[in-house]
Image: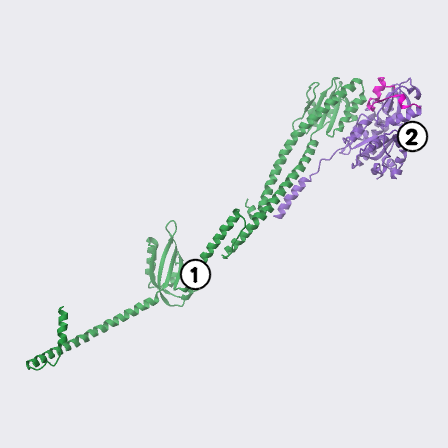
Chain colours: A green, B purple
Amino acid sequence: MNFLLRFPARWSLPLVLFLMSVPAVWWFSVLQHQEYSRLVESEETIRIKERLAIEQMRLEVQLGMGNLLQVRRIVASLGLRRDMLHAWLIGRDGRILAALTRVELDRPWDEVRGRLPLPLAAALAQMPDHGPAITLSRPASADFLLGEVELRTGHRLVVVSDLAAPLARRLEAGRSELAKQAGTLLFFALTVGLLLHLLWTQRMRRLLRAAERLGQGDFTIRAALPGGDELASIGAAFDTMAERLARQQDEIRRLATLIEQSPLVAIVWRNEPGWPVAFVSSNIVNWGFDKRALLAGAFRYVELIHPDDLPMIAADVERHLAHGPDRYVQEYRLRDGFGHWRWIENHTWLLRDDEGRVSTIQGVLLDVSRRHEAEEAMHRQSAELAARNVELERFAAAAIGREEEMIRLKREINALSRALGRPEPFDLSFLAAAEEEAQR
Amino acid sequence: MRRLIALLGLAFLLAACAPEPTPPLRLAVNPWIGYDPFVLARDRGPLDARLRIVEVASNSDSQRALANGMIEAAALTLDEALRLADAGVPLEIVAVLDVSAGADAVLARPEIDRLDKLRGRRIGVEAGAVGALMLARLLAAAGIDDSEVTILSVEAGQHVAVLTSGRVDAVVTFEPMKSQLARRGYRVLFDSRVLPGEIIDVLVVRPGVDARPLLAAWQTGLAALEQDRLAAAQTLARGVELSAEEYLDALSSLRLFRVEESAEWFDGGAAAPLARRAQPVVAELMRRGEIKQPPDWAALLGKGRR
């Protein structure tokens, strides 16, 4: 059956019809042969019986008249029947009185019979005596009919008629019929093939070409099959699929563009030692990597992680693989393609198979080196500010002490002045407002 | 793929073109001993596998079988062949087999010793056969009108029976019945020696039949007969109720033709020797209204001329 799948449908369908017609014709011929064999035997039996009935009457008349010449001619003229092989009129003395040939005349019946081919001689020897009734029989597996009739004069007329020739003629006529049937079947197969070609295979080829183009990535292709049959429905479904794929492709393209233009790097690792990279977005080139070399396994991902970070990262990954959770974030240093260390924020999620084993590790890498640098700078500035603040506090404490000494001196001077009855030289009213504010 | 379909198609064509069973070539011969070389060839064998030589009871049987399409060939007298052709039976004359020189005769009861004594008598003859021609010649020679005799139509196989039983007074017959009756004392009043070359026996076939196996059988039988006439007579006489000597005597009253001798009678179309010799027969058949128009010799002798 797979043999047929090697051919296009426009050939295989008519071929299947044709191949199915061959055993059908063969089987019909077998049945026809059996039927014809029965029919020929039946028809020949009737014909010979009818003929023998006539000859029985004619022979009895001529024998009664003693017209031996006419008797012999009546028997000899049985040879006009094209299938008559032998005819003998056997006298009461057991000698041949008349036959199809003159050489058998006057010879003993046993001698003539003994010279015949064995199957026929044996069949003739076993012919039972049926009296005046015409008897016809076909010995088992023989291709001839035996006929016998006993005349009132005591003579026996025995005939042998061929069945092979009439069967051959009937089969010949049947062969013509078979040839017509085979021709009709062939014509039918070719017509069906042509119709299928016109109705189906042309559109199937169109659909196939569209599918091939789609498979090659051309999502703009449409089958646009005419009609309202199943194939047209498949074509419509194909077109719907192509449209959806085109939209998805557009979205993917946009997404890919966004990713390419973003600092995010999409990456997929296989859960294998060394975490070989299965996919990485093209913007990895911005980090100095050759994407194809990375995918080809030119180096393992773990070799890119800073040696100080790797133990912690590997242990963390092993823990997530073993126990989850399946979404986590890691930060580590990665040596880029230029040989520089980058701080990477790695957002990871794990994909597991039906048995819970991690099959794929997907992640998005974000370069956070600048944030780290900013944080380090901020830490440095905070330390400087803290040191300066200590000095300032120290300076402020010194300045406040001196100011308080000055206020005390001014208050003493103002007290002396009031004691002296003089106006106070220093205005210290702001101190009263401050004390009042402090009390509140 | 195309090759496979072509092969399957070819197989079907071959199956459809399987050879048809070979049709038999059946030749009917009546009791006339001039046709016995065919019988001798058959009984000595072997014959062409297609050929079947069948002995029938009378000239009429041969004509009926040919007209009805039951046989492909027949041995007939020329006048019988002309009657059939005129009646529209398609046939071709392919050979001259023999010419009667006394083997056709009128035999009568012993007391009828002159032709004129046939007046008022009953005469048995096979209608539509060569006997009718003989009878016409007989009555003309005797000066008797058709109305002065009673004509009974009797087929050849019955000639002996009807004359010996007294149902007729005379019979127009031929060998071997002539010798059978002569042996029993019946008198020969008239025979074909007075009609030299008029009673010609020919081999006819239906158009399209290959006559070569027939001619080969004739030549074989004739050669066997010429080689050992007595042995041949002993074989053939058994079927015609004659002794070998009687058979040889009967045989001497006709001339058998070899195939090459026959061919000489076919040269010249309408002027062929056969057509020329047939003129008296044609004239008599036309006078009696047994044929309506002169024979188309070109069509009749087509194969024999070749």
Task: Determine whether B199 is above or below B108 in the image.
Answer: below
Total numbered labels: 2
Does B97 appear in magenta? no
Mark number, residue A348 = none
Mark number, residue B196 = 2
What's the residue type where badge 1 is placed? Arg
Q: How crowded is mark 1: few (under 14 residues within 10 Å), some or many (20 or more)?
A: few
Image side of residue A138 versus residue B120, left or right: left
Observer-side mark, 2 or 1, equals 1
Q: What kind of element bears circle 2? A: loop
What's the residue type where badge 2 is placed? Pro
Q: Distance between the residues labelled 2 and 1?
A: 123 Å
Task: Determine whether B118 is above or below A197 in the image.
Answer: above
Q: What kind of element bears circle 1? A: helix
- Residue B27 coordinates in the image, percent (x, y): 79, 31
Residue at horizontal 59 percent and vertical 41 percent from the top = A20
**Residue carrying label 1:** A254
The part of the image, by quadrant, that contains residue B104 is: top right
Image side of residue B135 versus residue A321, left or right: right
Residue stretch in magenta: B143-169
- B130 or A304, which is in the foreground? B130
Image side of residue B46 versus residue B273, left or right: left
- Residue A346 coordinates in the image, percent (x, y): 35, 61
- Image mark 2: chain: B
Q: Is residue A383 visible?
A: yes
The part of the image, by quadrant, that contains residue B150 is: top right
Does B147 appear in magenta? yes
- Residue A37 coordinates in the image, percent (x, y): 65, 31
Quarter of the rendering occupied by the C terminus of chain B: top right
The part of the image, by quadrant, that contains residue A296 is: bottom left
